[in-house]
């Protein structure tokens, strides 16, 4: 009877050693490979996000510059229109009229 129990235990140990442990090792290696692949994807995504943030910041800065330039041009245009009106008024006061 004790021999049967030892034989059963030995068979279980052999099964664990020959089947279960290699199966678990294969599963661990598979999961490890998946984790490495996902980490690579995550790192790429982080890099892409960083580049996108830099591009957005540059675009926003350029937009601010263009807005300022646009506002300056509008102000210059308005000033020139006022100068034209002032010149027309001065000419009218001097008796010169536009035809």
Image (spheres, rainbow, N blue to C red):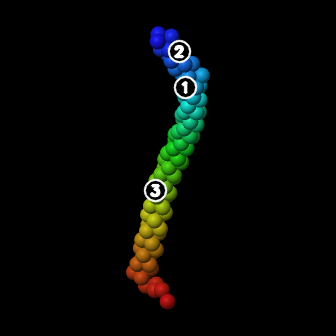
Marks 3 and 1, how far apart at CA: 71 Å
Residue found at x 56% / y 22%: 15
Residue 88 lies, with reference to residue 5, above or below; the image says below
Say whether residue 32 is left or right of residue 1: right
Residue found at x 47% / y 51%: 60
Q: Secondary structure at mark 1?
A: helix
Q: Nearer the viewer, mark 2 or mark 3?
A: 2
Q: Position of residue 80 (x, y in %)?
A: 47, 69
Q: Most extreme residue toward the bottom, as rendered?
A: 99
Could you tell me if the residues under marks 3 and 1 are in contact, i.e. CB atoms within 8 Å?
no
Residue 82 lies, with reference to residue 52, above or below; the image says below
- The residue pinned by badge 1 equals 20
Residue 41 — which label? none
Q: Nearer the viewer, mark 2 or mark 1?
A: 2
Q: Considering depth in this image, is 44 or 27 the residue closer to the camera?
A: 27
Residue 7 — which label? 2
Q: Position of residue 23 (x, y in %)?
A: 57, 28
Q: Earlier in the sequence, mark 2 or mark 1?
A: 2
Q: Secondary structure at mark 3?
A: helix
Q: Position of residue 97 (x, y in %)?
A: 46, 86
Q: Considering depth in this image, is 68 or 37 the residue closer to the camera?
A: 37
Residue found at x 43% / y 85%: 95
Residue 68 — which label? 3
Q: Secondary structure at mark 2?
A: helix
């Amino acid at each position: 009877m004790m021999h049967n129990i030892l034989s059963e235990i030995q068979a279980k140990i052999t099964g664990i050693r020959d089947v279960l442990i290699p199966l678990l090792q294969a599963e661990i290696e598979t999961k490890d490979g998946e984790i490495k692949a996902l980490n690579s994807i995550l790192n790429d995504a982080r890099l892409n996000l960083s580049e996108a943030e830099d591009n957005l910041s540059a675009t926003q800065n350029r937009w601010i510059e263009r807005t300022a330039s646009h506002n300056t041009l509008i102000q210059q245009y308005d000033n020139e229109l006022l100068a034209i009106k002032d010149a027309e008024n001065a000419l009218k006061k001097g008796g010169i009229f536009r035809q």
